[in-house]
């Protein structure tokens, strides 16, 4: 149960009728898996920690590099060479010492990924390559765990929700497994605030899903053109021939 300090800390959220005490307690009881602690995972993890999500499982096998600091706001110059999970834990604990952090500083695949996804109430895909995204999507479909997906490159970003509890599409319905070239910031560049916008939207969708309120992006893809400051919404359709969720 929440004490007086909790009620004060989260008072601005609790005031919202769509969240209230019940929704705040759902956040506290929730376990969220975040894969990737870079440009997207940084704001997503920070907002979920400060919003009061009880347990965050943080997955990243990389170390902090000088080139990360332009956009990966979880990390600082003093932590160059440190594991991103360790660096993230220091920042998140300073923001909210009540959050329970599970650190995984290795690449998750196979049974380890399957088990981590199954243990979570929600998964945020903040990775930067299709192999990881396909693996996360498959694990989420198998365990019926909602997935909040984000991506950002150059001046373009996108965010979507794939919820296996509905009859909607999965990530593989949107992208075929072959024929797509990986796009990474290290090779193509990215403007710093863009990842903050997309990562914050991932956190927002996660909060709505956990609190069971509002209309989520399930079945929809939001595409953001930062150069023109334009959003487009695409309706996503379930692919009956999808090798993951198709008949």
Image (cartoon, helix red, strand yellow):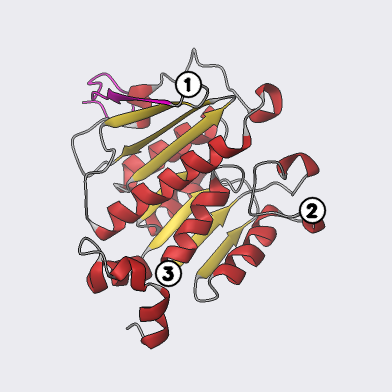
Kind of element beneath mark 2: helix
Q: Is residue 179 left or right of residue 42?
A: left
The residue positioned 21% from the left and 49% from the top of the image is 214
Q: CA distance from mark 2 to mark 3?
A: 28 Å
Residue 75 picture location, percent across and down: 69, 54
Q: Which mark is residue 77?
A: 2
Residue 65 picture location, percent across and down: 78, 44
Residue under circle 1? Answer: 228
Residue 215 picture location, percent across and down: 22, 44
Q: Nearer the viewer, mark 3 or mark 1?
A: 1
Q: CA distance from mark 1 to mark 2?
A: 32 Å
**Label 2 or label 3, whichever comes before in sequence order:** 3
Which residue is at the front of the view, 39 or 133?
39
Residue under circle 3? Answer: 54
The residue positioned 40% from the left and 59% from the top of the image is 119
Q: Nearer the viewer, mark 1 or mark 2?
A: 1
Q: Which residues are magenta?
A: 230-247
In the rendered image, the residue lying farthest to the front is: 228
Identify whether 127 is placed above or below 105. Answer: above
In which quarter of the view is residue 160 placed? top left
Q: Quadrant of the C terminus?
A: top left
- Asked if residue 240 lies in the magenta stretch, the reply is yes
Kind of element beneath mark 1: loop
**Label 3 or label 1, whichever comes before in sequence order:** 3
The residue positioned 55% from the left and 25% from the top of the image is 155
Q: Quadrant of the N terminus?
A: bottom left
Residue 241 picture location, percent across and down: 26, 18
In the rendered image, the residue lying farthest to the top is: 179
């Amino acid at each position: 149960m929440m004490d007086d300090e909790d009620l004060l800390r989260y008072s601005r959220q609790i005031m919202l009728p769509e969240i209230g005490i019940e929704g705040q307690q759902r956040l506290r009881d929730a376990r969220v898996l975040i894969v990737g602690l870079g440009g997207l995972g940084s704001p997503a993890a920070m907002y979920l920690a400060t919003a009061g999500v009880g347990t965050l499982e943080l997955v990243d096998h990389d170390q902090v590099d000088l080139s990360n600091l332009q956009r990966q706001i979880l990390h600082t110059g003093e932590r160059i060479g440190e594991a991103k999970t360790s660096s993230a834990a220091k920042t998140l604990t300073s923001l909210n010492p009540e959050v329970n952090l599970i650190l995984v500083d290795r690449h998750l695949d196979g049974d380890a990924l399957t088990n981590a996804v199954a243990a979570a109430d929600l998964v945020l895909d903040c990775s930067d390559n299709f192999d990881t995204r396909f693996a996360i999507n498959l694990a989420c479909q198998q365990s019926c765990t909602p997935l909040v997906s984000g991506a950002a490159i150059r001046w373009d970003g996108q965010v979507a929700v794939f919820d296996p509890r509905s009859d909607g599409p999965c990530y593989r319905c949107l992208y075929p497994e072959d024929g797509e070239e990986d796009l990474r910031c290290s090779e193509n560049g990215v403007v710093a605030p863009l990842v903050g916008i997309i990562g914050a939207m991932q956190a927002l969708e996660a909060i709505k899903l956990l609190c069971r309120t509002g209309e989520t992006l399930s079945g929809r893809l939001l595409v953001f053109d930062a150069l023109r400051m334009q959003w487009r919404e695409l309706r996503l359709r379930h692919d009956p021939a999808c090798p993951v969720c198709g008949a």
